[in-house]
């Protein structure tokens, strides 16, 4: 099982990260399967970072084998969505970028890909590019997103990924985060919503 993730897919987030340029194609990175955290299990802050930040995203579940998928057929290759958190060791990422070094360890560490309860696409809505999602920390909304604001829509991302990687059943796609990322602390309770439906609920330890 592979975890694909898209960076810089919301312009407002790119601006808050001082990256205001529009990417010409999807910016991809991968997380290992050991990054998955699910079923409401707690997230334990790692000792190697002083600033772990949340990035709330719509997550798509791949449902069939695919290679070189055309955009117009991409809808056939996923069956469910949820809300997820792409945790980032921001201090580690910043240092590695400044050194010109790969920064995968700041994104792919154990437990860094949190996923909520998946719901069938048919239940999520008629148009996946018209979904609202949000994150609450300790009862306060800290991040909101609307999939219509994606620079690269879901089907285009899937088509692009499949040029380089074979899609397999169970692979996950984190589609990018909107503006409003920030740090978490021990004791925080994070709850993720798709519209008004709560799909994600866990604590930071």
Image (cartoon, grey):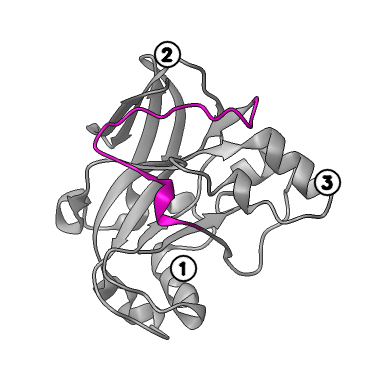
The residues tagged by marks 2 and 3 sit, at their Cα atoms, a distance apart of: 31 Å
The residue depicted at 42 percent of the width and 17 percent of the height is 188
Disc 1 or disc 3, which is closer to the eye?
3
**Residue underneath mark 2:** 187
Secondary structure that dominates the magenta span = loop
Q: Which residue is more in the foreground, 53 or 49? A: 49
Mark number displayed over residue 142: none
Say whether residue 58 is magenta.
no
Q: Could you tell me which residue is drawn at 28 percent across and 63 percent down? A: 170
Quarter of the figure with residue 158: bottom left
Q: Position of residue 12 (x, y in %)?
A: 61, 42
Closest to the observer: 51 or 27? 51
x 15%, y 51%: residue: 123
Residue position marked by numbered label 1 in the rendering: 157
Instruction: Say which element carries label 3.
Output: helix
> Would you name the residue on which mark 3 appears?
98
| Camera-side mark, 2 or 1 | 2
Left of 157 or right of it: where is 25? Answer: right
| On-image quarter of the N terminus | bottom left
| Residue at 63% across, 27% down | 51
State which region is magenta: 31-50
Looking at marks 1 and 3 on the same chain, the residue that comes earlier in the sequence is marked by 3
Q: Where is residue 75? Give x, y as percent.
A: 29, 71
Q: CA distance from mark 2 to mark 1?
A: 35 Å
- Residue 16 rendering spot, x and y as whole percentages: 67, 37
Instruction: For label 2, count other residues whose C-alpha is less than 10 Å away and answer few (under 14), some (14-19) or many (20+).
Output: few
Q: Is residue 53 above or below residue 58?
A: above
Q: Residues within 10 Å of mark 1 (few under 14, many from 20)?
A: many
> Considering the numbered disc 1 on the image, is that residue within a helix, a strand or a loop?
helix
Spatial CA span between label 1 and label 3:
28 Å
């Amino acid at each position: 099982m592979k975890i694909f993730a898209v960076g810089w897919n919301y312009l407002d987030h790119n601006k808050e990260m001082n990256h205001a340029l529009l990417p010409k194609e999807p910016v991809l990175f991968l997380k290992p399967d050991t990054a998955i955290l699910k079923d409401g299990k707690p997230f334990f802050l790692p000792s190697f970072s002083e600033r772990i930040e949340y990035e709330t995203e719509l997550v798509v579940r791949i449902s069939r084998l695919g290679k070189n998928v055309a955009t117009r057929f991409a809808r056939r290759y996923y069956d469910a969505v949820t809300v997820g958190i792409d945790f980032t060791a921001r201090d580690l990422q910043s240092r590695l970028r400044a050194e010109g070094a790969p920064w995968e360890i700041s994104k792919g560490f154990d437990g860094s890909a949190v996923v909520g309860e998946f719901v069938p696409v048919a239940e999520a809505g008629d148009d996946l590019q018209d979904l609202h999602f949000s994150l609450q920390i300790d009862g306060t909304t800290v991040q909101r997103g609307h999939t219509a604001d994606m620079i690269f829509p879901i089907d285009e991302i899937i088509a692009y990924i499949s040029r380089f990687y074979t899609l397999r059943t169970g692979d996950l796609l984190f589609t990018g985060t909107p503006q409003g990322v920030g740090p978490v602390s021990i004791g925080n309770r994070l709850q993720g919503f798709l519209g008004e439906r709560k799909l994600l609920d866990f604590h930071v330890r």
